[in-house]
Image: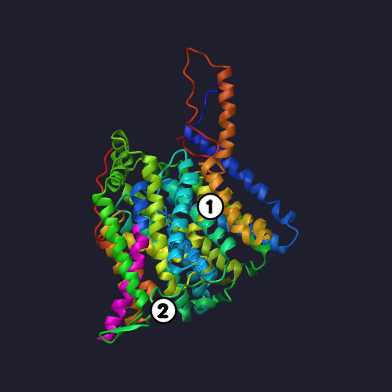
Amino acid sequence: MSDTVQLLLAGLGTGSIYAMVALGFNIIFKSTGALNFAQGEWVMLGGMVAATLYAAKVPLAVAFVVAVVVAMAVGALSERLVVRKLKKPTPMSITILTIAIAICTKSIVMLTLGKSPAGLPSFSESGPISIAGAVLETQSLWIIGIAALVMAGAGYFFNRTVLGKAMRAAAAQPEAAALVGISPKLTMSLSFILAAAVGAVAGVIVTPLTLTSFDHGTILGFKAFCAAMLGGLGSLPGAMLGGLFLGLAESFAGGMLSSHFKDAVAFVVLLLVLVKWPNGLLGRGQVEKV
Amino acid sequence: MPTQPRTSSFAGHRLDRHRWTLFAVWVLALVWPLVAPNDYVLSLGVYFFINLILIASLNVIMGWTGQVSLAHAAFYGLGAYVSGVLNTRWGISPWLGTIAAIAAVGGVAAFVGWATLRLRGPYLSMGTLGFSGILSVLFVELVPLTGGPNGLAGIEPYEVFGYALDTPGRFFWFAWLVGALVTWLLINLFCSVPGRSLRAIEGSEIGANTLGVNTFRAKVIAFSLSAGMAGLAGAMYAHFNQFASPETFGFFASVLLVVMVALGGVGSLWGPVFGALVLTCVPELLRRFQDSELLIFGLCMIVVLLYLPGGISSLGQRFGRARQRKHLVKEADPSKPLRNLKMESPNGTVGH
């Protein structure tokens, strides 16, 4: 029993991280139709900046905020200086450009912040607590809580605010949205900034548990793709569901079968889900028009 | 200038020209063993041909059907391991192993393709992403078969009539020949009806559908063929290197292959040649910059992608087109419409 609870809690913790990264991934997929390979690097960037600042005696909360702002600036610059310069943007060309952005981001972080792994202390000082016989790091609670807040905030933003609705409109019908005065350039910039911000938050909150280093981003980005497609590409609740599902699948596969094949089990689940529901759990098929 | 009556059809004419280019390029490549100062540089020549097959294979699925596969390095690895494991564990000849590798990788890809190509959109990317993850884990964890993280050592080289292809000098000829054969097959496919129906999918899938192309079947076959080619490249790699290690075939390697296809020119027949040149030479050239190597590479990539969207192979096309335009303007006759400049191009891409 306590084992099951332990695995459940661990799965929820990693699942929340996957869900947040997948959310950022989905935001850019919605607005450009491209797979964003830089998403994982933004997560790493957030963690690295916060850890470097904290090591330089900056208070944790300030380091957190600065890290997110830096990542937002990097997201904005990537869009402004690179993606927007593309003469004929297609999903494939943007996808490939994001690979280049990812490579550049990763190497700049390596050159400026160093190669050694960096960490952060847990957000609250109390040690591990026990729930129903399972031991839980308090940081996991922070992760689950902050992820829930970010998800709720994103839901509010995209469904209730004018700006969020404008972004959805521009993603669905760029020309029609432009006709009613929504600038496609602005919404595109915004989607990169938001995606980077969400990624950086995930990066900062996961660092106390796992440490981070310049090459940590790729694998996280990779998992986030899987989570995003499990839930259904471009769907906000899908990202949440997919992330949690992937986190739980990994945790239980690792705990009950074999930790060696943990990753493989997650991918097998992914392939099986794709065979049965090609659009993901919550994704909707697109009607193709000529 | 009076126009010469053409004996061959338009497509036939282009086919001839591609064949002659192939002949010229491959004859030129023969110089490499003569100018290479040592075995190491010569082995780069071998890797060039292996990379060429690998990148050309990805170009088939990316350029001709517009789908991005993120598992090509994993397919390459699967090819290497199938042939390598058959050879080291059961002593099966490298030749049979290579055939088994092509068949196994092609078959596995047919399944992945069947599962993910039913829908339009980036579903193949996702399926292949997951698949690449599974293979990476298996390469590392199936220790009794693959040797695990330490890699698979002691793979035997190919042998021709008792003559082992175990040095770069000997293997070069084999790689040269296989590279030529594969490119020749691709040229034929490129200009044939199945090849053109594939490329029609890249242009407009619905359009191709309405013209009677079974796009689902065509895409699955193309993907399986493409993966089989990657398997061939993998088997060649295993028997040349005589060693295979899991990190060669990771996710980042797959992404890098996608980049090489893009840098060469997506969908261009000659793009993979440039892509393979970049993949083989650039790491060697950038090595002296050490840590900033990746940054320089990333920045160059951005510049090429932004300012040369057709890839490196479109450079020649650009010059050709500019010259042709000048030429045509000079002898333009107001009573005759200008010939469509975009219909053919030296590197084989169909004009946009």
The kind of residue tagged 1 is Met
Report which quarter residue B321 is drawn in: top right
Report the residue at 63% width, 48% height from top.
Answer: B26
Residue B204 in magenta stretch? no
Q: Chain of mark 2?
A: A
**Residue B97 in the image, given as x and y percentages of width and height:** 50, 69
Return the residue at label 1. B260
x and y percentages locating residue B235 in the rendered image? 52, 65
Q: Nearer the viewer, residue A189 or A285?
A: A189
Q: CA distance from mark 2 to mark 1?
A: 32 Å
Is residue B306 visible to us here? Answer: yes
Residue A17 is covered by the magenta coloring: yes
Q: Nearer the viewer, residue B199 or B311?
A: B311
Within 10 Å of the Cα at label 2, are there few (<14), some (14-19), or many (20+) other Cα atoms? some
Q: Which mark is residue A260?
A: 2
A239 on left or right of A96: left
Amino acid residing under circle 2: His
Q: Which residues are magenta?
A: A1-23
Q: Determine which of the numbered discs, if any, sits on residue A144 in the image.
A: none
Q: Are marks 2 and 1 on the same chain?
A: no
Q: Position of residue A33 (x, y in %)?
A: 36, 48
- Tell me the subunit letter for badge 1: B
